[in-house]
């Protein structure tokens, strides 16, 4: 049995290492992440995680994990910004408001699938033009849903969350640990 991470996210790799999980292989799947017409953020995120884990090539005994993190303002899905202008638009939309961060996790072993999704409410402070310009200049917005990462310098913009901090970073550890155990991953060795 091998553990395969179906994600190229360095944040997910780091989070897994916090609970002692080391990937035997990393195989980020290539899928179309375009939302369906009228698709709401939570079902979209769950669908993305399921499609990602299904696309990873693995042996029957291997455990594969994939996840998706989506930022939502109301019914609007904010994915990874295509450029700095879109990152700025996303951040201005969230400035001074609450938004939701949804992270869906899918674990597969053979034909069996285990899934969980976690919704965290996040408040972003009102951003000044100076704060916004300074943050955008760091390029930390690149490759991050909604254009920010709570674990980086944008953490200074987030005075409040209700839910899972690790889910906002990209992988809810409590739920992920339970999914891995359900799939037969020896998370705690022989201790159980």
Image: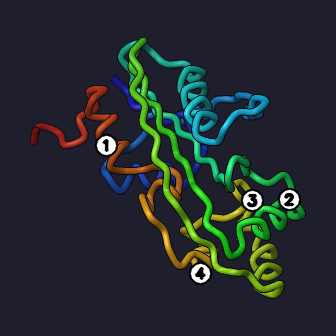
Q: Of the two numbered discs 2 and 1 on the same chain, state the one appearing first in sequence.
A: 2
The percent coordinates of residue 129 (x first, y second) are: 83, 84
Q: Of the two numbered discs 3 and 1 on the same chain, state the one appearing first in sequence.
A: 3
Q: Which residue is mark 3?
A: 142
Residues at marks 3 and 1, CA–CA distance in whole angstroms: 28 Å
Name the element at disc 3.
loop
Residues at marks 2 and 1, CA–CA distance in whole angstroms: 34 Å
Q: Of the two numbered discs 4 and 1 on the same chain, state the one appearing first in sequence.
A: 4
The crowd level at tag 3 (other Cα within 10 Å; few <14, some 14-19, many 20+) is some
Identify the residue shown where x is 35% and y is 16%: 61
| 127 vs 134, nearest the viewer | 127
Q: Are marks 2 and 4 in contact (CB under 8 Å)?
A: no
Label ID, residue 32: none
Residue 40 sits in which quadrant? top right
Q: Which residue is mark 2?
A: 86
Tell me: 174 left or right of 45.
left
Identify the residue shown where x is 55% and y is 33%: 46
View extreme (left): residue: 191
Q: Which residue is mark 4?
A: 156
Tell me: 133 left or right of 27.
right
The crowd level at tag 1 (other Cα within 10 Å; few <14, some 14-19, many 20+) is some
């Amino acid at each position: 049995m091998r553990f395969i991470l179906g994600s190229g996210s360095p944040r997910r790799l780091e989070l897994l290492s916090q609970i002692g999980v080391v990937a035997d292989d990393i195989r980020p799947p290539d899928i179309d992440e375009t939302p369906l017409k009228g698709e709401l953020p939570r079902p979209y995120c769950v669908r993305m995680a399921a499609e990602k884990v299904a696309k990873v090539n693995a042996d029957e005994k291997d455990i594969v994990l994939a996840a998706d993190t989506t930022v939502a303002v109301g019914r609007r899905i904010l994915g990874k910004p295509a450029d700095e202008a879109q990152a700025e638009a996303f951040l201005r939309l969230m400035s001074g408001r609450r938004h939701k961060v949804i992270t869906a996790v899918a674990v597969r072993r053979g034909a069996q699938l285990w899934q969980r999704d976690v919704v965290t409410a996040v408040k972003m402070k009102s951003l000044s033009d100076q704060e916004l310009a300074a943050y955008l200049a760091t390029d930390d917005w690149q490759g991050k849903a909604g254009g920010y990462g709570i674990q980086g310098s944008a953490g200074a913009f987030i005075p409040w969350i209700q839910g899972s901090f690790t889910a906002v970073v990209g992988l809810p550890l409590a739920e992920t640990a339970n999914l891995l155990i359900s799939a037969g991953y020896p998370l705690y060795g022989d201790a159980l």
